[in-house]
Image (cartoon, grey):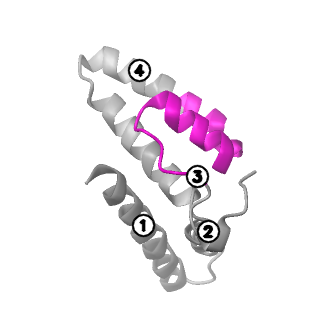
Amino acid sequence: MSQPAPNGGEVIPRPEKTPAALKAALAVVAADRLQEMVEGQSRAMAEAIDSGSVQPLRNFVDHWAAVVEIERFPGTSQAYHRANYLANHAGTVAECRRRAIEVAEIYRTAYAAVTG
């Protein structure tokens, strides 16, 4: 479970972009997603071996850095999960699309913050 953030700020500082640091950060801000991360790391490793490229590992690290970036800010996390929930429970295609765009925008912003 995440800790309350003082003055609505970050729960934890931005971790280094290493699998170990991201896993430790995820354990604080979104422990329920640790198994998903471990499974993703295994898939990325297998893909890297099969392809002879480190790109799957880079993609894995960048994705989880973005997830942690979202989760370490309670307001951002709440907005992201709310939009995702509403997209999945929308009554119309238009509403689903609008909420999915919100989800994508939050993710893109977090991804840009950790990769750019």
Where residue 60 sits in the image (x, y, percent)? 40, 36
Mark carried by residue 12: 3
Q: Are marks 4 and 2 in contact (CB under 8 Å)?
A: no
* Quarter where residue 82 is shown: bottom right
- For label 4, the residue is 45
- For label 2, the residue is 88
Label 4 element class = helix
Residue type, label 1: Ala
Report the span colored magenta.
Answer: 12-39
Q: Is residue 30 visible?
A: no
Residue type, label 4: Met
Please tell me whether residue 92 is drawn above or below residue 43 in the rendered image.
below
| Label 2 or label 3, whichever comes before in sequence order | 3
Q: Is residue 104 visible?
A: yes
- For label 1, the residue is 104
Task: Based on the picture, tell me whether residue 48 belongs to the magenta stretch.
Answer: no
Residue type, label 3: Ile
Where residue 76 sits in the image (x, y, percent)? 55, 69
Label 1 element class = helix
Between marks 1 and 2, how big is the CA–CA gap? 14 Å
Q: Main secondary structure of the magenta part?
A: helix
Between marks 3 and 1, how big is the CA–CA gap? 23 Å
Residue located 62% across and 68% down the image? 88
- Neighbor class of circle 3 (other Cα within 10 Å; few <14, some 14-19, many 20+) is some
Please tell me whether residue 26 is drawn above or below residue 92 in the rendered image.
above
Residue type, label 2: Asn
Label 2 element class = helix
Q: Are marks 1 and 2 in contact (CB under 8 Å)?
A: no
